[in-house]
Amino acid sequence: MPYTDTQPDDTLQELKLIWFEQVQDECRDLAEALSALEREALQPPLAEELYRIFHDLQGQAGLFGYSLLATVSARFCVYWRNHNGKIGPQQLPVVRAHIVAARSLLHRKLEGNGGPDGTAILAELDAVTKA
C-alpha cells in the first residue's frame, strides 16, 4: 500500500465536503416535496421519498458533525412512523416545519447542536408537533 501524507482528519474533512455537496441535492428534493405538499396532499411515493431523505440525513449528518440536523431528521422519522407514513392536511404543518428546519440548518451550515439557535429550532418543532 502506498504511503500518503493524508491524515485521518484530512480524509474525514474531504468526505464531509463531498457529503455536504451531495446533500444539497437532497435539500432541493426537500424543497420540491414542500411545494408538492402545499399544492396537494402528499402522494405515498413522495411521502416515502421524503422519509428516505430524512432517514439518510438522520444517519449521515451526525457522522459529519451536524448533530442538530440528525436530531431534526430523527424527529421527522419518528413522526412519520407514528402516522404510518400517511401525510395529509393535518400533518402538513409538522412536515413543513421539519423541512424548513432541515433546509435552514443546511443553508446556514449549522454544525453541532446549534447552541441557542438549535435549542430554539427544537422548541419550535416541539410546539408545532404538539399543536
Image (tube, rainbow, N blue to C red):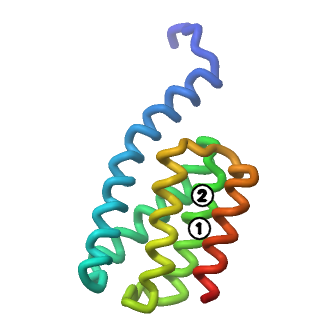
Q: In the rendering, which numbered label is found on residue 70? A: 2
- Report the amino acid beneath label 2: Ala
Up the image or down, 76 lies above or below 55; here it is below
52 with respect to 78 (left or right): left
Q: Quadrant of residue 41?
A: bottom left
Q: Nearer the viewer, residue 60 or 122?
A: 122
- Dots 1, 2 in contact, CB < 8 A: yes
| C-alpha span from label 1 to label 2 | 6 Å
- Report the amino acid beneath label 1: Ala
Q: In the rendering, which numbered label is found on residue 74? A: 1
Tell me where residue 78 appears, x and y as whole percent: 57, 78
Tell me where residue 11 appears, x and y as whole percent: 56, 25
Helix, strand or loop at disc 1?
Answer: helix
Q: Callout 1 environment at 10 Å: few (<14), some (14 to 19), or many (20+)?
A: some
Q: Quadrant of residue 51?
A: bottom left
Q: Nearer the viewer, residue 28 or 23?
A: 28
Tell me where residue 58 appears, x and y as whole percent: 55, 59
Q: What count of labels does the image hold?
A: 2
Up the image or down, 30 lies above or below 26; here it is below
